[in-house]
Amino acid sequence: MRIIGEILDETILRNERIDRQVQEHIRFIERRLIKWKSLPIEEQALSILKEHNLVEIPIPDDNWGGAIRKFHSDKVVPIINTAQPRIYQYFIYWHEIYHLTEREEISIHNDENYEISTEFDLNERKADYFASQMIFGYSDLHDYFYSLEYDDFIVKIAHCMKSFKAPYKAVLIQLYQIAKKNQNEQLQHTINLYFDKQYTIQDWRAVFQEYALDDNLIKPSYVTNLNSIINAIKSKIAQHPDVELFQDNLKVVKEWEAKYKNVQRELKERYDG
């Protein structure tokens, strides 16, 4: 569900409803992340996705961030749209990790009260809330926001986006949730005023550059990476060199790779032009 200002309070209520389960899932994930604790949070996510045969391709669709695809062998593969700005990709990393790992946790969970949701919107809210909590962690976004000595609300939000490597609406939702908990009605009102405003990559690029922030965060990466599929097929070819099906599959995937590298070049030229 696309979140708009009209349902912001409802979103916060849903977050409260799912908070216990999401926090349990975070603890489950953190136990798996011990070997990557020294990495930045987005690199931790990338490491998990690579373990699950990550595919990265640039798709010129502003509304499509990523997905989990299931193949005939029951293997699930995360796909990330690299035509999205990097901070959106980082958020989608964790969103898709929730979907990748939720069933694994349920299978070992002993709490009979653990709610397995079949409601699409609620499950997507869980994935978004999980992603948000992984990104913001135990830090206090509210205190950081008020430590910034700028009058312009959007400039302060841009600094939050840069410091936490989080998308615009993720910052606003997290900030609103804290403001509501602290009964900070003025901040809630301000967030409501700005929540539905639309800002382009060029808009953010101008703000980031003016205030010497790392504008690479709001640029797409346009990466094309089908190596997990290519390497899996090559492994099958090495085991069964006489099976033509594997050779045919490799040819098809190589054609996909060439197609998306062309898209990659076109999008880069359009962005830089």
Image (spheres, grey):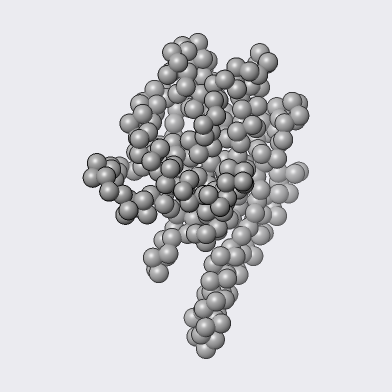
- Residue 204: x %, y % from top left: 66, 31
Q: Is residue 201 above or below residue 257?
A: above
Residue displayed at 52% across by 54% down: 49
- Please indicate whether residue 17 sits to the left or right of residue 268 in the image: left
Is residue 160 something one can see in this rendering?
yes
Q: Quadrant of residue 71?
A: bottom left
Residue displayed at 46% across by 48% down: 31
Residue displayed at 71% across by 46% down: 270
The quadrant the C terminus occupies is top right
| Number of residue marks | 0
- Please indicate whether residue 272 sits to the left or right of residue 70 in the image: right
The residue furthest left is 112
Q: Is residue 266 above or below residue 198?
A: below
- Please indicate whether residue 259 sits to the left or right of residue 8 in the image: right
The quadrant the N terminus occupies is top left
- Residue 214: x %, y % from top left: 72, 35
Is residue 154 something one can see in this rendering?
no
- The one nearer the camera, 94 or 9, is 94
- The one nearer the camera, 238 or 255, is 238
Residue displayed at 72% across by 31% down: 213
- Residue 117: x %, y % from top left: 29, 43
